[in-house]
Image: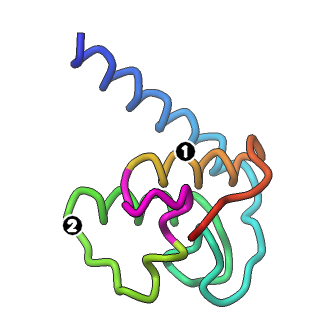
Amino acid sequence: MIGLARHAFAAAIIALLALAAMAPGVRAGFHVCGDPTNDGIVNSLDALYVLQVDAGLVHLPPPAFSSTDVNADGAVNTLDALLILQHTAGLIATLDCA
């Protein structure tokens, strides 16, 4: 049952990545909520970066933590990536960084 839920979650992430790839990025400024890459655009690359942070593949510098924890729960994880993708695809209007 847990394996099935993980596959469904992964499928949802992939679908949102596809939607986000078609949507233009949201223009942003310096250390904007949802922009851990700090390139001024909130897009699917930011979600990918969050997934890499959660998997331990890349290190998140401390200044970027507050702009990456988009649901303000004190953790940077796959839920933050999902919310960034939903925002990029226009499914949610704003992100709630701490």
Look at the picture and state if 94 lies above or below 7.
Answer: below
Q: Nearer the viewer, residue 97 or 10?
A: 97
Predominant secondary structure, magenta span: loop
Look at the picture and state if 13 lies above or below 51.
Answer: above
Disc 2 residue type (three-letter)? Leu
Q: As drawn, is 48 to the left or to the right of 72?
A: left
Q: As drawn, is 48 to the left or to the right of 22?
A: left
Residue 38 image position (x, y, % from top left): 56, 83
Q: Which residues are drawn in magenta?
A: 68-77
Per the image, the residue denoted by label 2 is 57
- Which of the image's four quarters has the C terminus? bottom right
First in sequence: mark 1 or mark 2? Answer: 1
Q: Which residue is drawn at 63% across and 72% down?
A: 33
Per the image, the residue denoted by label 1 is 17
Disc 1 secondary structure class: helix
- Which of the image's four quarters has the N terminus? top left
Q: Which of 16 and 36 is in front in this view?
A: 36
Residue 56 covered by magenta stretch: no
Q: Which residue is drawn at 47% across and 36% down?
A: 14
